[in-house]
């Protein structure tokens, strides 16, 4: 049980360490508009603002155009001036604070940059950004929920021992047994699966919880965590590192001297095998990122139909389709967590499998 918590903590801190704000170019903060002014609704900007990461948590927009938001902490380290900690409110709506601002266009769009007294980029590289963004905060919420669930489950087993599951234990136990019996053992092997179970359980529940929380459209939920390519990159990186560091001699022999391959083909086969080592985690990263992001974009696109056509007649149709897509997304949330865990177990099993002797 302690090993499982260790895997969880390593996973969380790894994600927090490399997750950076991702905001598409051209997206600017909402500013208050004069009362009575009407601006053309930009569906693309609306969708991408909700899908992308941000330094603030938008709650609602008032009739006068001003917005209500929860501003998250900004933590940046500049090589010249050192560490800075302040609220993102100070750099919202195009403002600058203490020589820092959020770039809305160009190479560093969406990132915190250094600006001069006129608010223009001074040409230097962005400072190191350790800010608590929407994605980071969403991961913290998911990690807290995961810890509460697993600690309560462990406490139940310590008190009652092996007994018929009750309450929420009855929900978690079949899922854990499913991951063990239908994912870990068939792909890794009955004698080796045990030491990889903590990671497989952690990554499955972490992805599942974040997928489900991303479907709840209000604070503190709704962050598109698994739709952030930085998050999926780190998850795939963990699978890659565990796979390669657990690999046996047979795995590396197959990469650099595949049995049955003529010697003259090795200069061609070795690069292909090495590319294959990296293409597997790359496919894991893109699959999770693309599927979750696509689902959010489709749902938000259906919502924007109401504002595009500006008629109440479209609302019932749009809402019905949104509810239908939400049901599909519930299935996708479980499916993507299952696929990522299954492929991780498959890659680990391929790297640790012993050669068959005939």
Image: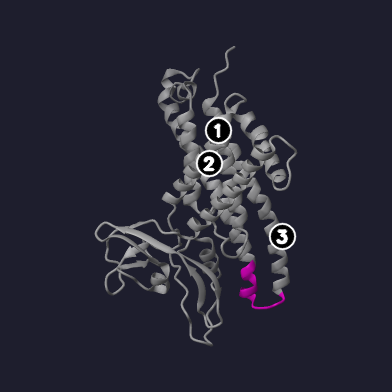
Q: Earlier in the sequence, mark 2 or mark 3?
A: 2
Left or right: 318 as drawn, with respect to 69: right
- Spatial CA distance of label 1 from label 3 is 37 Å
Task: Please tell me whether residue 94 is drawn above or below residue 333 in the rendered image.
Answer: below
**Residue at the spot 70% in from the left edge and 40% down from the top edge:** 174
Residue identified by numbered label 3: 324
Q: Which mark is in front, 1 or 2?
A: 2
User: Residue reaching furthest front?
Assistant: 159
Q: Residue 185's x, y, as percent?
A: 63, 29
Whether the magenta-drawn stretch holds residue 45 is answered as: no
Label located before the other in sequence (1 or 2): 2
**304 magenta-colored:** yes
Res. 196 mark:
1
Q: Quadrant of residue 201?
A: top right
Query: Looking at the image, is 206 positioned above or below residue 262?
Result: below
Front tag of 2 and 3: 2
The residue singled out by tag 2 in the image is: 5
**Nearest to the observer: residue 257 or residue 218:** 218
Task: Count up the numbered dots.
Answer: 3
Range of the magenta residues?
303-313
């Amino acid at each position: 049980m302690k090993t499982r918590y260790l895997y969880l903590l390593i996973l969380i801190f790894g994600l927090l360490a490399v997750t950076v704000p991702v905001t598409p170019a051209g997206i600017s903060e909402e500013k208050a508009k004069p009362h009575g002014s009407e601006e053309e609704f930009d569906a693309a900007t609306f969708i991408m603002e909700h899908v992308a990461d941000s330094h603030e948590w938008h709650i609602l927009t008032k009739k006068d155009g001003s917005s209500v938001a929860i501003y998250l902490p900004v933590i940046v380290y500049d090589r010249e001036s050192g560490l800075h900690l302040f609220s993102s409110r100070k750099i919202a709506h195009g403002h600058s604070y203490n020589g820092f601002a959020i770039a809305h266009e160009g190479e560093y769009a969406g990132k915190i940059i250094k600006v001069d007294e006129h608010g223009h980029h001074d040409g230097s590289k962005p400072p190191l950004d350790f800010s608590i963004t929407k994605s980071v905060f969403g991961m913290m919420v998911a990690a807290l929920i995961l810890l509460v669930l697993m600690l309560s489950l462990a406490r139940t087993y310590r008190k009652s021992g092996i007994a018929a599951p009750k309450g929420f234990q009855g929900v978690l136990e079949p899922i854990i047994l499913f991951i063990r019996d239908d994912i870990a053992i068939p792909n890794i092997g009955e004698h080796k699966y045990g030491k990889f179970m903590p990671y497989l359980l952690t990554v499955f529940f972490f992805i599942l919880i974040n997928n489900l929380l991303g479907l709840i459209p209000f604070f503190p939920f709704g962050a598109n965590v698994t739709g952030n390519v930085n998050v999926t990159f780190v998850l795939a990186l963990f699978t890659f590192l565990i796979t390669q560091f657990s690999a046996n001699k047979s795995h590396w022999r197959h990469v650099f001297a595949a049995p049955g391959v003529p010697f003259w083909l090795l200069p061609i086969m070795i690069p292909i095998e090495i590319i294959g080592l990296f293409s597997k985690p790359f496919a894991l990263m893109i699959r999770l990122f693309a599927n979750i992001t696509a689902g959010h974009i489709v749902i938000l696109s259906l919502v924007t139909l109401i504002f595009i056509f500006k008629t109440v007649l479209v609302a019932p149709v749009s809402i019905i389709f949104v509810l239908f897509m939400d049901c599909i997304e519930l299935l996708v949330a479980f499916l993507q967590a299952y696929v990522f865990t299954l492929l991780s177990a498959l890659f680990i099993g391929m790297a640790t499998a012993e050669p068959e002797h005939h």
